């Protein structure tokens, strides 16, 4: 059987769903989701704030170090 014939057969066997059936399937899948608790959400938010603050400080220190190196090199060039 050729590749195009296989594609045609697989395309024909795809089940068509109505909009109502699609909504039912979405609701069924949504019920399977384990939603985070309020505490988990707050803790995750706090961790994001802490990590972004630490990264901001890290990059500030690295940038300040590079700035000092550039100023030193430019002063040597004079």
Image (spheres, rainbow, N blue to C red):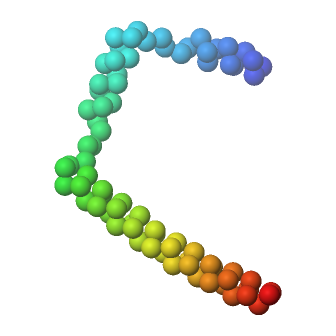
Residue 41 vs 61, above or below: the answer is: above
Residue in the foreground of this view, choosing between 66 and 22? 66
How far across and down, in percent of the image, does residue 6 sit?
69, 19
Q: x%, y% of residue 8?
A: 67, 14
Relative to residue 61, is residue 78 depicted above or below?
Answer: below
Determine whether, in the image, residue 13 is placed left or right of residue 5.
left
**Residue 75, image x, y percentages:** 73, 87
Q: Is residue 69 left or right of residue 47?
A: right
Residue found at the very far front of the displayed protein = 78
Choose between 54 and 75: the one closer to the eye: 75
Residue drawn at point x = 30 percent, y = 57 percent: 44
* Residue displayed at 52% across by 72% down: 59
The residue depicted at 39 percent of the width and 67 percent of the height is 53
Quarter of the rendering occupied by the N terminus: top right
Residue lying farthest right?
Answer: 77
Which quadrant is the C terminus positioned in? bottom right
Look at the picture and state if 27 lies above or below 62: above
Q: Which residue is drawn at 41% across and 71% down?
A: 54
Numbered disc total: 0
Residue 50 picture location, percent across and down: 34, 67
Which sits in the foreground, 9 or 1?
9
In-image side of 59 versus 3 (left or right): left
Instruction: Name the image quarter holding residue 3.
Output: top right
Instruction: Please tell me which residue lies in front, 5 or 41.
Output: 41
């Amino acid at each position: 059987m050729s590749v195009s014939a296989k594609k045609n057969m697989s395309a024909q066997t795809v089940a068509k769903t109505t909009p109502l059936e699609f909504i039912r399937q979405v609701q069924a899948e949504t019920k399977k989701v384990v939603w985070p608790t309020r505490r988990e959400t707050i803790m995750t938010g706090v961790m994001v704030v802490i990590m972004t603050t630490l990264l901001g400080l890290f990059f500030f220190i690295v940038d300040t170090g590079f700035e000092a190196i550039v100023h030193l090199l430019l002063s040597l060039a004079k």
